Image (cartoon, rainbow, N blue to C red):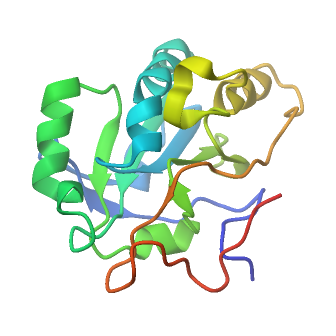
């Protein structure tokens, strides 16, 4: 079995605490026409460099019934900045328009096969995976981006068209797995395309 969730696969269930003080499960988003789950963190320059373009994508598609859920699975033992306390502070500072969940056990990141931060997963109304990969082509310097693959996938899906590109490689820092070197990747993790 591939490390990363395959196109057409169902979204794995989760129950995780959020920076807003609540706990969320997959079922809490059942009203969403489309659900975008993305693995992110506090410190990665690819995340920091693209958060504002992700915000623009949320602002564009939320009125069309798309919900966005960020999940931080990075080990705080690798990067102290990725602790839950820092997540709360970051959301308070930037007021991002998504729910920000903490996957301390990293079980959800493993279930989805998160490779990098950021790594996006787009699920249809039945919660089947229709797109996975990067948000934009240059996340570290999003202002230089020529392609917003996440926006293109959402646009195509909402219009009822086949996705022009359903699969891309996420671009960013690898997920920081607890007890491993900062650059370690699971042996069965590989490029998506």
Position of residue 129 in the picture relative to residue 88 (left or right): right
- The answer to whether one can see residue 45 in this image is yes
- The answer to whether one can see residue 65 in this image is no
**In x, y percent, where is residue 171?**
61, 48
Q: In which image quadrant can residue 94 be found?
A: top left
Q: Which residue is drawn at 25% across and 64% down?
A: 79
**In x, y percent, where is residue 128?**
69, 52
Position of residue 132 in the picture relative to residue 26 (left or right): right
Total number of numbered labels?
0
**Location of residue 170 with respect to 151 vertically, above or below:** below
**In x, y percent, where is residue 138?**
62, 33
Q: Residue at x 13, y 31 (%)?
A: 92
Quarter the C terminus occupies: bottom right
**In x, y percent, where is residue 96?**
30, 27
Position of residue 63 in the picture relative to residue 137 (left or right): left
Q: Residue at x 61, y 20 (%)?
A: 144
Quarter the N terminus occupies: bottom right
**Location of residue 190 with respect to 166 vertically, above or below:** below
């Amino acid at each position: 079995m591939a490390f990363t969730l395959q196109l057409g696969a169902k979204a794995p269930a989760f129950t995780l605490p959020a920076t807003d003080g609540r706990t969320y499960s997959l079922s809490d988003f059942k009203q969403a026409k489309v659900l975008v789950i993305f693995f992110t963190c506090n410190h990665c320059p690819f995340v920091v460099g693209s958060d504002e373009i992700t915000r623009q994508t949320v602002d564009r598609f939320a009125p069309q019934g798309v919900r966005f859920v960020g999940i931080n699975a990075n080990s705080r033992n690798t990067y102290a900045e990725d602790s839950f306390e820092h997540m709360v502070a970051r959301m308070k500072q930037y007021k991002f328009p998504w729910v920000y969940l903490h996957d301390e056990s990293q079980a959800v990141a493993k279930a989805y096969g998160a490779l990098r931060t950021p790594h996006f997963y787009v699920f249809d109304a039945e919660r089947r995976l229709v797109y996975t990969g990067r948000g934009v082509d240059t996340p570290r310097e999003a202002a230089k981006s020529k392609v917003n693959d996440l926006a293109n996938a959402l646009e195509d899906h909402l219009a009822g068209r086949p996705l022009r590109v359903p699969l891309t490689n996420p671009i960013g820092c690898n997920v920081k797995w607890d007890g491993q070197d900062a650059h370690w990747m699971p042996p069965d993790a590989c490029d998506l395309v």
